[in-house]
Amino acid sequence: MRESTTTDVDPETIHQIGLKQVAEIEKEQLAIANKLGYKDLKSFAAAIAVDPKLHAHSREEILDLYRKYIGQMEPKLPQLFGRLPKAKLLVMPDEPFREKDASAAEYVTGTPDGSRPGHVMVNTSDPEKRLTINMESTAYHEGVPGHHLQLSMAQEVGTLPPFRQHGFWGAYVEGWALYSERLGKEVGFYQDPYNDYGRLQDEMLRAIRLVVDTGLHYKHWTRDKVVQFFHDHSAEDEPNVQSETNRYISWPGQALSYKMGQLEILDLRTHAQKELGSKFDIREFHDQVIDSGALPLDVLQTQINDWIAQKKAAAK
């Protein structure tokens, strides 16, 4: 757990954080469902599952949606960052030989010299079975301002040693990508309420992980209890629930990294806003977070606190 989260937060605290996050996200989801005319989340999820308008109709449509969302985000990036990577980003379909077992989408880093751009690799198989409501949040997570922006910036900071340019700390890297999904909301996207619900679904999965991973390995939950918690608090289908449960059993602690990293970045941002007041600049904050390569969360906290102190000293 310490290795995965790069913190000393104890398992009981993480479990309680997870329960709180699940409850808060459910409230947001229910508000969207009520707005769209549904009384509860189960009936809303059931309607989504059979609505052809919320499913893809072709492989090309899936690629077009990812390109659309990344394309609309790119002009907004100067509002959020002072420095941007030079590396280009392409959206490409998974190769046919591996699409059967590939995730919905993943990021492949470009080369440091720019000879190969970064790629968001998208699984376009069985398009009619794929919901479109998660594609906007996934585009921001895997593309910009998520993995592509952060990993490309790390490679382009020439003053960093190679182990930091190419380093990977899951809590930081995945925490940043999950945080980036919310940035889309902050700059005015997720205009379609179904896509906003899809964003919350993605966040709910990461919150559930805090509960069930600590449930398994700290509270000694049974497999059935983990599966039941999933069904009580998400719309994940049975094969995915079983696959996720296998993952947590066989890889203790790894699933804690995403949400713990996101929450740490959000906490540091709130702290910086409180300390700096009118001197707080979101672009400077984001530059501080991503310009040093991936960091353990305790080192990131030190870096942000040092930056706050420097800003205060300069103001005086």
Image (spheres, helix red, strand yellow):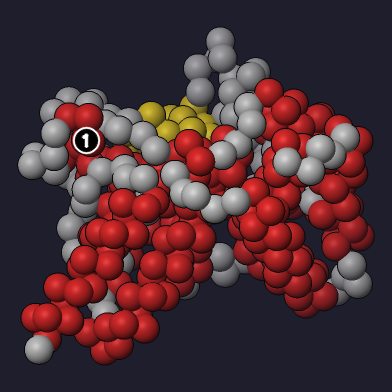
The crowd level at tag 1 (other Cα within 10 Å; few <14, some 14-19, many 20+) is many
- Residue 206 coordinates in the image, percent (x, y): 63, 49
Q: Is residue 230 left or right of residue 142?
A: right
Name the residue at the top extreme.
Answer: 97
The residue beneath circle 1 is 165
Residue 187 can be seen, yes or no: no
Residue 12 can be seen, yes or no: yes
Looking at the image, which is closer to me, 77 or 236?
236
Residue at screen point 29% across, 59% down? 302
Residue at screen point 72% across, 28% down? 249
Vertical relation: 128 (above or below) 263: above
Looking at the image, which is closer to me, 275 or 7?
7
Q: Hey, what amino acid is under mark 1?
A: Gln
- Residue 80 coordinates in the image, percent (x, y): 30, 67
Q: Quadrant of the N terminus?
A: top right
Residue at screen point 37% across, 53% down? 298
Q: Find numbered disc 1 in the image and state the secondary structure of the residue it sits on.
A: helix
Q: Quadrant of the C terminus?
A: bottom left
The picture quadrant where one finds residue 82 is bottom left
- Residue 180 coordinates in the image, percent (x, y): 44, 56
- Residue 214 coordinates in the image, percent (x, y): 70, 44
Q: Is residue 247 left or right of residue 297?
A: right
